[in-house]
């Protein structure tokens, strides 16, 4: 009982499959009497073919559709007629139509003897033949019972001729909707690939040192165009002015040039993993064939396509091998690229087999490249993340480096020279403007240093300067140089800043001496000279060693004033030019005392010397 039940189920399943199985063309005929007339039917199978003849002129031979007549004729040039008998229900739908794919290279379709489709100018004579690349939907007037479908094809110039794609019978609305969906997908893929192409070309323009984005950008755009040239052939509808020859060239270029571009892309991306002969191999094969497509007529450049397809397959295997080496050497992103390329290469092989009519699949290269783009985006994301982390690390290092360099070259010097960073400073950069120059020096330092060891000398000087430097900066000045026990400071603003700084330096010295006395050391004395005048601040030296410096008589005068503190027995001396810059009202606040005029070494004009009132005991 159980066995009988199983048998009945199997019979019912087999019957169901047979009932709903898609009809197949056999012996030049297809029976669609049980067809529900809603879903489209592919008219695939064995048609009748009349080589170099019309049906009434000769006897037919069986031929497989889709398939070129090369298999029946042994050649692609010529003409012939495909014939199919279509049996429809007694009351067929009135809105039936035929979906017409690309037919190489001109065609004329008759339904029950009436022309319903024309692509190019079909003719049995080469002189009258005009090729075209056209797809679309042809409306039919069906009748119950037998209907005759004839497809007359002529071809001179393409290596594949005849019905190389499937024809579909369905409703007019349904087939137009299917075509619109195919066109939408092709346009969508082209848009995605075009945007990615422009993006990568933009990356190259911003970083011309890395050419790999340039190759990948052009590769994306070309393969995006391929989806518009083949399939539903939307490009011929969009640009009807393009002739058959131009569309053939564009279609072949979307196959020949990408082989070269992808090799260049991989070579520049993983130069260590690619063998030296890979680039010459790509240039010799793909470059030569691309040039041939550009300059030769279609009848010539289509002939070696089979050889080039084998070459592309070999080139793809070599690229897989090179990417495998990159994975083995642990180059960044090589694993992702290998997976993406294998998927992309599989679609390229599919298109080669499809072109040669070995498999009935659609063209998939744009989809393969889209999949590859996903993997490449992951690699770019990983590289971007790593590069961003590196840039952050380098930025932090650069900040620390600039901070350290500012200890040697003051930020104010860069500001005066109008430089953002020390790396922008060049030999000979300079600026001229009036400033106040201060020299502050420890009295009798030579005698003092003889009583200390070298280590004690450095500790003493640094302890002293650590207290004096902040005072200068607090009054809008900056230390230009430390000269052993001395300080040379510049005050670009008001002359009062320099005088206030001198007063506070004296106060800082008093506090420092108290610290020294508590530590068992003797007090020290200091002399300060301040002069104001024009000076040049810039860089001197040579390419391997530069330094910032100040060149001016103002510097010499300030230094001589500091030296005069010993002669006059005062700790702070100020020049007459500085007092004039202060103004009489402000100068009076400091209780300045005029001492004398002094002619100092290196200066013709005498200096008027003023002294700040000494500290009260």
Image (spheres, rainbow, N blue to C red):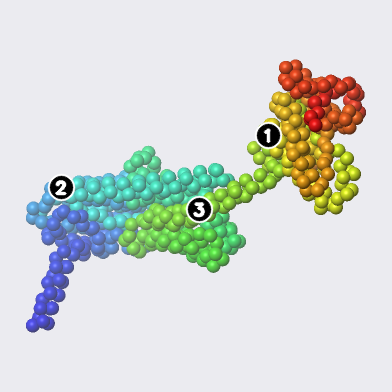
- Dot 3 lies on which element? helix
Q: Is residue 344 left or right of residue 451?
A: left
- The N terminus - image quarter: bottom left
Q: Earlier in the sequence, mark 2 or mark 3?
A: 2
Query: 168 or 407, which is in the foreground?
Result: 407
- Dot 1 lies on which element? helix
Query: 541 or 463, which is in the foreground?
Result: 463
Give the Cα separation between the discs numbered 1 and 2: 93 Å
Q: Write down the residue under mark 3.
A: 385
Q: Write down the residue under mark 1.
A: 474
Q: Earlier in the sequence, mark 1 or mark 3?
A: 3
Q: Is residue 552 left or right of residue 158?
A: right
Residue plotted at (14% across, 75% down): 10
Residue plotted at (11% across, 82% down): 2
Compared with 289, 359 (above or below) is below
Q: Write down the residue under mark 2.
A: 95
Residue plotted at (69% across, 31% down): 475
- The C terminus - image quarter: top right
Q: Is residue 286 left or right of residue 355?
A: right
Mark closer to the observer (2, 3): 3
Give the Cα separation between the discs numbered 2 and 3: 57 Å
The number of discs equals 3
Q: Position of residue 390 (x, y in %)?
A: 57, 52
Mark closer to the observer (1, 3): 1
Q: Position of residue 305 (x, y in %)?
A: 45, 57
Give the Cα separation between the discs numbered 1 and 3: 43 Å
């Amino acid at each position: 009982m159980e066995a009988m039940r199983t048998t009945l189920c199997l019979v019912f399943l087999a019957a169901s499959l047979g009932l709903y199985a898609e009809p197949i063309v056999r012996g030049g005929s297809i029976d669609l009497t049980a067809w529900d007339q809603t879903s489209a039917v592919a008219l695939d199978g064995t048609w009748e073919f009349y080589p170099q003849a019309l049906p009434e002129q000769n006897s037919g031979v069986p031929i497989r559709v889709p398939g070129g007549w090369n298999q029946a004729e042994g050649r692609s040039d010529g003409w012939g007629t495909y014939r199919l008998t279509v049996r429809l229900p007694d009351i067929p739908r009135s809105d039936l139509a035929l979906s017409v794919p690309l037919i190489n290279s001109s065609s004329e379709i008759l339904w029950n003897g009436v022309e319903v489709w024309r692509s190019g100018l079909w003719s049995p004579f080469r002189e009258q033949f005009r090729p075209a690349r056209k797809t679309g939907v042809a409306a039919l007037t069906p009748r119950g019972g037998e209907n005759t479908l004839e497809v007359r094809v002529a071809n001179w110039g393409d290596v594949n001729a005849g019905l190389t794609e499937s024809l579909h019978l369905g409703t007019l609305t349904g087939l137009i909707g299917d075509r619109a969906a195919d066109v939408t997908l092709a346009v969508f893929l082209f848009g995605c690939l075009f945007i990615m192409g422009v993006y990568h070309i933009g990356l190259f323009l911003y970083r011309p040192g890395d050419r790999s984005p340039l190759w990948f950008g052009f590769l994306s755009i070309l393969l995006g165009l391929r989806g518009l040239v083949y399939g539903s052939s939307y490009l011929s509808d969009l640009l009807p002015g393009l002739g058959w020859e131009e569309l053939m060239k564009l279609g072949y270029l979307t196959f020949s040039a990408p082989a070269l571009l992808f090799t260049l892309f991989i070579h520049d991306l993983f130069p260590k993993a690619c063998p030296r002969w890979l680039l010459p191999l790509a240039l010799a094969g793909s470059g030569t064939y691309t040039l041939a497509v550009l300059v030769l007529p279609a009848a010539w450049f289509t002939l070696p396509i089979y050889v080039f397809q084998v070459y592309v397959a070999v080139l793809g295997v070599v690229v897989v091998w090179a990417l495998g080496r990159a994975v083995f050497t642990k180059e960044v992103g090589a694993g992702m690229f290998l997976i993406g390329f294998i998927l992309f290469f599989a679609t390229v092989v599919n298109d080669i087999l499809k072109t040669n009519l070995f498999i009935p699949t659609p063209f998939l290269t744009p989809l393969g490249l889209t999949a590859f783009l996903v993997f490449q985006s992951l690699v770019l994301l990983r590289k971007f993340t790593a590069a961003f982390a590196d840039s952050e690390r380098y930025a932090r290092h650069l900040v620390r480096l600039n901070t350290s360099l500012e200890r040697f070259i003051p930020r104010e010097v860069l500001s005066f020279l109008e430089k953002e960073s020390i790396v922008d400073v060049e030999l000979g950069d300079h600026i001229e403007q009036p400033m106040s120059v201060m020299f502050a020096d420890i009295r009798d330092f030579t005698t003092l240093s003889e009583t200390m060891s070298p280590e004690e000398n450095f500790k003493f000087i640094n302890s002293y300067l650590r207290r004096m430097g902040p005072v200068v900066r607090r009054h809008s000045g900056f230390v230009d140089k430390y000269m052993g026990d001395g300080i040379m400071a510049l005050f670009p603003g008001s002359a009062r800043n320099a005088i206030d700084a001198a007063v506070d330096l004296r106060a800082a010295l008093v506090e420092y001496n108290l610290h020294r006395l508590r530590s068992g050391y003797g007090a020290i004395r200091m002399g300060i000279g301040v002069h104001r005048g024009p000076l040049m601040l810039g860089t001197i030296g040579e390419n391997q060693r530069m330094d910032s410096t100040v060149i001016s008589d103002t510097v010499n005068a300030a230094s001589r004033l500091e030296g005069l503190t010993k002669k006059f027995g005062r700790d702070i001396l100020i020049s007459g030019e500085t007092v004039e810059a202060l103004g009489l009202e402000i100068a009076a606040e400091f209780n300045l005392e005029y001492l004398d005029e002094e002619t100092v070494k290196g200066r013709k004009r005498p200096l008027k010397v003023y002294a700040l009132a000494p500290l009260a005991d």
